[in-house]
Image (cartoon, rainbow, N blue to C red):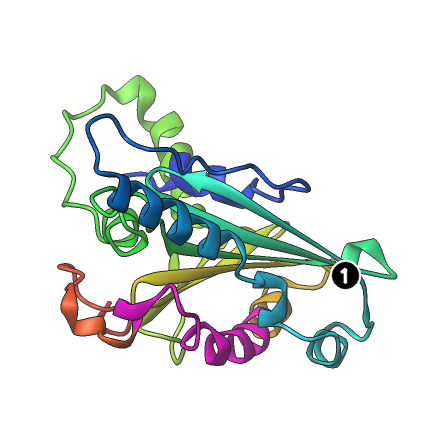
Amino acid sequence: MSHRPTISLLLCALLYSAVPLSGGKAPGGSPQKSARAVKDTRSAKKIDVCALLTSAEMEAVQGEPVKETKPSVQPSGGFVMLQCFYRTTTSAKSVSLALGAPDPAKPSALTPREFWRKQFHPPEPVEEEKHVAGKATKKAEVDREEELRKPRPIDGLGEEAYWVGNRITGALYVLQGDAFLRISIGGGEDESVRIKKAKALAEKALKRVDALPILPAGRNPASAGLGGGSAREQ
C-alpha cells in the first residue's frame, strides 16, 4: 500500500497564514458543552508552536539564527496541525515544524495517534493479480519509485519515528503520546545530513511537547496501542 497520498499532503503543508477553527455550538448541544468546546479550541490555537524550538537551537543546527517565525493552524481530518515556519537569513536553510494535536472541540474525531496507525501501520495489502509480461518493466519502475518513498524507521526518537522523502525533499515524523511532530529541514545537503539535523531539532522539540496542556493523554502512550509493531521492530 502506497503512503504517498496522505504523506504528500503533509509534506506540502508549509502554510503561511492561520486557518481559523470553528468552535460554534453544535446542533442540540448543551450551552455548557458548547462553551467548553470553544474554550478548548481557543486554548489549542493559543499554543505557541514556534516556542518548541529556540533561535539558538536552530543556529546550532543550521548555522544561522532565526530571523522570523510564522505560526499557523490548520484543521486536518479531525485533529489540528499547529505549524511554524522558521525563516533564516538563507531561505534554503529555513525549517518547517508542525505538531499534529488532538482537537478538543472534536473528541470523537480522528486523533493524531489513529492517523499515525493508519499511515505507518496499514493493513497488509491484498495480493494483486499478476501483470502481463509486457507491463513487467513498467511495474518494476513503479515498485522501485514507491520503495524509495517508503517511510524509513528512525531509532531513538519518541515512541516511533520515520523519515519520509527522497534525495531532494523529505520530512521527519515523530510520534509522542497523542501527538506527532513533522520537521522538514532545508539546506540542500545530502539526505543523511538532513536526517541528522532533523533528529537534533526533534530531540529539542520533544522535551517541550510533553509539557503542552492540550496533550493530557500524551503522558500515557500505552492508552492506545499502534497495532502494528514499533519502528524499532521493523
- Image location of residue 193, percent across then percent down: 63, 70
Q: Quadrant of the C terminus?
A: bottom left
Question: Tag 1's secondary structure?
Answer: helix
On screen, residue 170 above or below 203: above
**206 in the magenta segment:** yes
In the picture, measured across the screen, residue 228 lies left or right of residue 202, that is: left
Residue that carries the numbered disc 1 in the rendered image: 93
The front one of 143 and 159 is: 159
**8 in the magenta segment:** no
- Image location of residue 7, percent across then percent down: 43, 43
Sort mark 1 into few (<14), some (14-19) or many (20+) by Cα contacts within 10 Å. many
On screen, residue 152 above or below 137: below
Residue found at the very far right of the displayed protein = 89
Q: Residue at x 66, y 64 (%)?
A: 190
User: Magenta residues, as a range?
Assistant: 198-218
Q: Amino acid at mark 1?
A: Lys
Q: Residue at x 30, y 41 (%)?
A: 34
- Image location of residue 84, percent across then percent down: 63, 56
Total labels: the figure holds 1
